[in-house]
Image (tube, grey):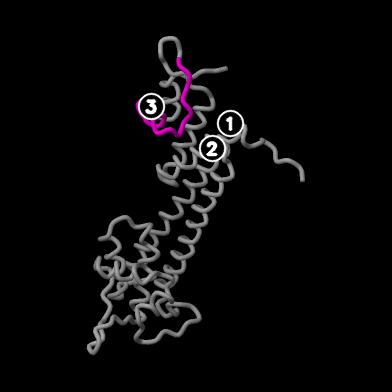
């Protein structure tokens, strides 16, 4: 069996040997054997684990990658794959919403919600149903200064206009692709003040971020499959039906 020194794996992955020890301490990589002098004896299995972990970080994040690799260590390949499948499905949904929002910004004459005729004044419940967003999220975005619904002078209840619906759709799209609250405010306010070219550019940047995440996720999935082959959880060739 071929053994790797920590420095060999570190050089292959362009990381430090201390990073390898950190990953090992997290319990997401099998504990290696030790040489007579106490040095770690990594194998091709360890290399596959480390390579998979590093490949999954950009697209899925550290916590998620660690959760998946724990499943692999325990032989739960389907649990790991379904977790990844859910993340990909969520990203697909984000991409769909982002594309629809960008389409709205590119043609402000399009209806805000397809096949729906919007009332000039809507309650928070109606706005939530139209945009598939929880009322609590809408209240939170108002608190953060992203939304400024009007108030009924008689009862003080919030009411939302079609422009507010457009803003909610924008926030829904951008909350996971734009990482700074000020950036989100900039996009929403640009749409509010009909600075549509600026809003479009910011929304396009958000869509680019989603596309990059998708490529990173696919790269991580490739290494996950290679890891499963290395540890014997997945055959190289699919079995015949």
Give coordinates of residue 112: x percent, y percent. 42, 77
Q: Please identify the quadrant where the N terminus is shown.
A: top right
Q: Nearer the viewer, residue 238 or 70?
A: 70
Give the residue at the far right of this rendering.
Answer: 241
Whether label 1 touches label 2, CB < 8 Å: yes
Label 1: few (<14), some (14–19) or many (≥20) C-alpha neighbours in 10 Å:
some
Q: Which residue corresponds to mark 3?
A: 21
Q: Earlier in the sequence, mark 3 or mark 1?
A: 3
Q: Which residue corresponds to mark 1?
A: 231
Q: Residue at 37% of width from left, 74% of height from top?
A: 166
Q: Nearer the viewer, residue 198 or 42?
A: 42
Q: Nearer the viewer, mark 3 or mark 2?
A: 2
Give the residue at the far top of this rendering.
Answer: 36
- Would residue 30 be counted in the magenta stretch? yes
Give the residue at the far bottom of this rendering.
Answer: 154
Q: Earlier in the sequence, mark 3 or mark 2?
A: 3
Q: Nearer the viewer, residue 65 or 26?
A: 26
Give coordinates of residue 225: x percent, y percent. 57, 39
- Would residue 137 be counted in the magenta stretch? no
Q: Residue at 28% of width from left, 72% of height from top?
A: 147
Label 2: few (<14), some (14–19) or many (≥20) C-alpha neighbours in 10 Å:
many
Give the residue at the far front of this rendering.
Answer: 74
Mark drawn on residue 72? 2
Task: Give the extent of the magenta segment.
Answer: 16-34
Label 3: few (<14), some (14–19) or many (≥20) C-alpha neighbours in 10 Å:
few
Q: CA distance from mark 3 to mark 2?
A: 19 Å
Q: Residue at 59% of width from left, 45% of height from top?
A: 78
Q: CA distance from mark 3 to mark 1?
A: 21 Å
- 230 versus 95 height, above or below: above
Q: Earlier in the sequence, mark 1 or mark 2?
A: 2
Task: Please tell me whether mark 1 sits on a helix, a strand or a loop.
Answer: loop
């Amino acid at each position: 069996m071929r053994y790797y020194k920590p420095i060999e794996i570190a050089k292959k992955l362009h990381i430090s040997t201390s990073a390898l020890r950190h990953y090992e301490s997290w319990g997401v990589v099998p504990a290696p054997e030790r040489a007579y002098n106490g040095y770690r004896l990594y194998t091709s299995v360890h290399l596959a684990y480390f390579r998979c972990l590093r490949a999954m970080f950009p697209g899925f994040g550290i916590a998620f990658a660690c959760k998946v690799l724990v499943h692999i260590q325990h032989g739960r390949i389907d649990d790991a794959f379904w977790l990844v499948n859910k993340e990909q499905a969520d990203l697909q949904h984000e991409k769909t919403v982002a594309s629809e929002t960008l389409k709205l910004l590119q043609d402000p004459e399009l209806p805000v919600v397809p096949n729906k005729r919007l009332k000039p004044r809507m309650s928070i419940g109606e706005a939530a149903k139209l945009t598939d967003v929880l009322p609590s999220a809408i209240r939170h975005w108002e608190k953060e200064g992203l939304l400024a619904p009007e108030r009924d002078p008689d009862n003080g209840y919030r009411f939302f206009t079609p422009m507010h619906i457009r803003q909610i759709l924008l926030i829904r799209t951008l909350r996971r692709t734009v990482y700074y609250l000020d950036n989100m405010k900039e996009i929403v306010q640009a749409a509010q003040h009909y600075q549509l070219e600026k809003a479009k550019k910011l929304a396009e940047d958000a869509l680019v971020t989603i596309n990059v995440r998708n490529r990173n996720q696919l790269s991580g999935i490739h290494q996950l499959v290679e890891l499963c082959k290395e540890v014997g959880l997945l055959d190289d060739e699919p079995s015949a039906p």
